[in-house]
C-alpha cells in the first residue's frame, strides 16, 4: 500500500495510506489528538497513584504516542513499561520526514535544558531492536512488537494497566473493532485497568461491556465530537 507524508492542522505530520484513504493520526492535528486521547483520557488517571504502570499500544505507528508518554513519565517521575504492537513498521525514511520531535517538545519548556538528552531518547526509541525490552530512560522501558493484533492471543506480555487502542478506523478495518480482538486485548489487562481510544463505536462499547468494562463517552479531540474510555474496576470521576 502506498504511504505518503501529509501535514495536519496543528503543523505536525502523519502518514496517509492512499489505497485506504486513511491516516495514522487525525488530520485536525496529530499531536493534539495524541495528548487528548491517550494522555488526558488515559495516562492522567494513573499519575496520582505513584506506582509503576504497564501500557500496551495497539498500533505503534510513528511512535508519537510512545514518545509523548516517555516525556510524561519524566515530567511526573512515573515508571512506565511500554509495549507497542505494529504489523507494518514505519520506515527510517518516513520517520525522518515526519520528525515530530519539535512539534512535541514545544509542550515541555521545562525540559529545554535537556533537549539533546530527549532527542537521543527520541532516536533511541525508533532504532530500538524489535521484540526486545529496551531501557530508554530511567523511567521508561520500551518493547516494540511486530505482529498482527490478533496474534496477541498467544502473547507472553500481559497484566497491562492501560491500553492505547489506536488501530485504523472501522471504515477501513472493521474487524479491529469487533468483539474478537477486543476480547483478546481485554484478556491482557489487569483486574483494574483502562482502555482508551479515539473512536466512539457502538461495537467497541458492546465488546468492552461484554468483557467486564464500564464504557464512558468523553469529548473528542479537535475534529471529533466524541471518544470512549473503558474502565475495569477503576474508580473514576
Image (cartoon, grey):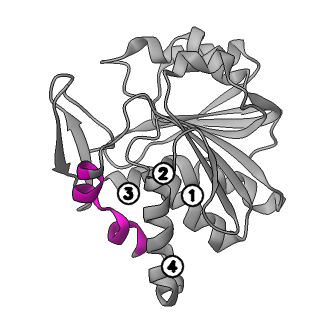
Residue designated by label 1: 69
Q: Secondary structure at mark 1?
A: helix
Magenta part, dominant SS: helix
Q: Position of residue 22 (x, y in %)?
A: 25, 30
Residue 48: quarter of image: bottom right
Gap in angstroms between the C-alphas marked 2 and 4:
19 Å
Q: Earlier in the sequence, mark 3 or mark 2?
A: 3
- Which of discs 4 and 3 lies nearer the camera? The answer is 4
Residue designated by label 2: 65
Magenta segment range? 93-105
Asked if labels 2 and 3 touch by Cβ distance under 8 angstroms, the answer is no
- Which of discs 2 and 4 lies nearer the camera? The answer is 4
Gap in angstroms between the C-alphas marked 3 and 2:
8 Å
**Is 154 situated above or below 30?**
above
Asked if labels 4 and 1 touch by Cβ distance under 8 angstroms, the answer is no
Residue drawn at x 46%, y 33% is 86
- For label 3, count other residues whose C-alpha is less than 10 Å away and answer few (under 14), some (14-19) or many (20+): many
In the picture, the disc for residue 31 is: 3
Q: Earlier in the sequence, mark 2 or mark 4?
A: 2
- Which of discs 1 and 4 lies nearer the camera? The answer is 4
Q: Is residue 107 visible to us here? A: no
Gap in angstroms between the C-alphas marked 1 and 4:
16 Å
- Which of discs 3 and 2 lies nearer the camera? The answer is 2
- Which of discs 3 and 1 lies nearer the camera? The answer is 1
Gap in angstroms between the C-alphas marked 4 and 3:
21 Å
Magenta run includes residue 97: yes
Amino acid at each position: 500500500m502506498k504511504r505518503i507524508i501529509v501535514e495536519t492542522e496543528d503543523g505536525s505530520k502523519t502518514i496517509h495510506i492512499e489505497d485506504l484513504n486513511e491516516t495514522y493520526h487525525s488530520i485536525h492535528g496529530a499531536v493534539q489528538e495524541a495528548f487528548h486521547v491517550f494522555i488526558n483520557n488515559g495516562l492522567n488517571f494513573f499519575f496520582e497513584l505513584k506506582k509503576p504502570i504497564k501500557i500496551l499500544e495497539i498500533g505503534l505507528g510513528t511512535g508519537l504516542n510512545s514518545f509523548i508518554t516517555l516525556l510524561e513519565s519524566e515530567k511526573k517521575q512515573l515508571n512506565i513499561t511500554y509495549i507497542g504492537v505494529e504489523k507494518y513498521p514505519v520506515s527510517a525514511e518516513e520517520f525522518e520526514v515526519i520528525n515530530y520531535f519539535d512539534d512535541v517538545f514545544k509542550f515541555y519548556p521545562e525540559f529545554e535544558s535537556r533537549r539533546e538528552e530527549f532527542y537521543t531518547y527520541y532516536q533511541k526509541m525508533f532504532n530500538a531492536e524489535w521484540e526486545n525490552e529496551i531501557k530508554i530512560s530511567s523511567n521508561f522501558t520500551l518493547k516494540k512488537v511486530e505482529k498482527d493484533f490478533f496474534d496477541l492471543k498467544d502473547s507472553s506480555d500481559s497484566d497491562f494497566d492501560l491500553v492505547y487502542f489506536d488501530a485504523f478506523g472501522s471504515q477501513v478495518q472493521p474487524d479491529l473493532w469487533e468483539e474478537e480482538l477486543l476480547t483478546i486485548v481485554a484478556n491482557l489487562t489487569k483486574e483494574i485497568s483502562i482502555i482508551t481510544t479515539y473512536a466512539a463505536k457502538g461495537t467497541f462499547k458492546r465488546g468492552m461491556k461484554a468483557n467486564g468494562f464500564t464504557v464512558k463517552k468523553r469529548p473528542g479531540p479537535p475534529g471529533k465530537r466524541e471518544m470512549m474510555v473503558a474502565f475495569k474496576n477503576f474508580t473514576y470521576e
